[in-house]
Image (cartoon, coloured by chain):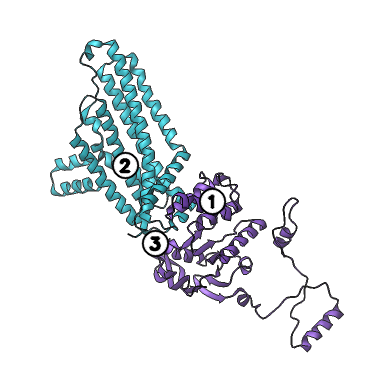
Amino acid sequence: MNAWQFSPRRVGLIARVTFLEARRQRLLPLLMLGAAGLELGAQMLEEFNFGLSELKFIADLGQGVAAFFGSILAIVASAQLFFREIDERSALTLLAKPVRRSEYLAGKFFGIMAVISLFCVLMTALIIVMLWSRETALMHGRPELWERGRHLNYAAILAVGFAHWLGLAVLVAFTLLIASFAQSSLFTVGVSLGVLVICQLQFLAQEAYAKAGTLGGRWVAGFIALLFPNFQVFNLGDVTGVEGEIGVMLLARVTGYALFYVGVAGMLAVFCFKRREI
Amino acid sequence: MSAEPAVVIQELTKDFELGLRGTRLRAVDHLSLRIAAGQIFGLLGPNGSGKSTTVKLVLDLLSATSGECRVFGVPSGCMESRRSTAYLPESPCFHRYLTGRELVGLHGGLCGLRGAPLKARVDEMLSWAGLAEAASRRVGTYSKGMLQRIGLAQALVHDPRLVILDEPTAGMDPAGVADITALILRLKAEGRTVIIVSHLLEQVEEVCDRVAILDHGRLVREGTPAELAGSASRQALVVDPLNPEQLTELSAWLEARGRSLLSVGPFRSGMDRSFLLTPPAGHAAKYKP
């Protein structure tokens, strides 16, 4: 076997350096602080005692905040960590070594995903702790409503967090695709935010075109649906609520959907980056 | 010395596209070079003459518009050619939060070293570069001279046969220049081929075996530094001051032997040289005449 084929070890080394760089930029703690502050703000609702609907509100707010700050982190960290090495020319010394450009990009992706994973784990843990403590307090206050035990499905909340993480992986892959041919991090951030908005809202366009009923409209809707992933797919919280269950098949479908788009965006990014002049 | 040339460049051309109107800038223009193994080769020329672009083409960091480049017989587009190549870019900026040891270890790992051999090689390279004591310090705290030396250590960690140094002494003080010059000469003594890219002709003159001068991407001249300076058949004598009668006498003595006195003037000692001969108190002289 050729010793210079695609090497997971080289990918791991680049991912580690990317993660260290992200840690040094202190972007993660800053966003964590903001997100945690907003989530903890939901605790102020304690005084109102809305019962189950209060728990749903806390869960929705927490997941919304995690998705919002997670998206910012995914786009900004991807653009920053990609362009920093290019601008400072440390990428030159790495790519002058026997390192494939596909390994370099994969290393960047996994390094950024390590940061995103840390963010998602901490945010999901915070949401679960908040919901658990609030549900416990409500159980003591109105025990008649909790005669059959806890209402919240914490496994489903974990699954919702996992689906958010998958959505952020797709966003990181698309941001790296844009960065692979863009000339500045500002351009990358701007275009990636545009892509995020399209991905979040594309289902509205699909519905509108489907209602229009014209062949051309359906073609356009189909093309948009194929080109841009539908980020509502990763929003499992809306599907299940706080009490519902998330089936393994649904989770597998969402995982496959994310892997498809990460793979396609990754291959296109490698194609563009191979032609990029460093 | 190996018979196989270290680098063969044939009719290499590189055009950069500017804007959307199809305007092109030719950075390297049908360049052909042959660099023998074991040499220190200087690639000289003014800013914008295509030196760095040529080096990036050799390293496959850029793709050529046309022409071919081989490193030890292997096309430069192949990964295997980078196995035998080391590169230190101009004013390198490394990952500042890594220690010197971690940085060299990272680059060694990327080259396939691991475990005890990697650790031993990292220690060896840090000692070679004179950075053993600073190995546990973050690279962000290094001086310019130390950055160049850690750059050399990371470049050489995989024991390459070809070392490419882009402006290796840019922005350094004379003591730092002397350090890097000594390391370059050690590389040659170890049997490696060294390509030095510079626009400072005097600086490379004392270390290079051969020199190529580029301008507008084309090869203008190639030869030994003495050939290019036109001094291969001339000598300079440094003597105590002579009065006019003594100069006339010396001229007549030379003419009687078929030689000519071509130039007489005050002796100019380079500022760098006098700095190194008279170092600040507490610092040993680095330059031995």
Above/below status of B17 relative to B30: above
Residue kind at label 2, given as amino acid type: Ala
Residues flagged by tags 1 and 2 on a common chain = no
Above/below status of A43 relative to B246: above
For the point 42% across and 50% down, the residue is: A184
Name the residue carrying label 2.
A169
Tag 1 secondary structure:
helix
Tag 2 secondary structure:
helix
Answer with left or right where residue A178 lies relative to residue A154. Answer: right
Q: CA distance from mark 1 to mark 2?
A: 38 Å
Chain letter of mark 1 equals B
Q: Nearer the viewer, residue A181 or A147?
A: A147
Percent x, y of residue A151? 23, 20
**Count of number-bearing discs:** 3
Q: CA distance from mark 1 to mark 3?
A: 26 Å
> What is chain B's hue in the picture?
purple
Name the residue carrying label 1.
B123
Chain letter of mark 3 equals B
Camera sees residue B221: yes
Percent x, y of residue B228? 60, 76
Chain letter of mark 2 equals A
Name the residue carrying label 3.
B79
Percent x, y of residue A132? 31, 21
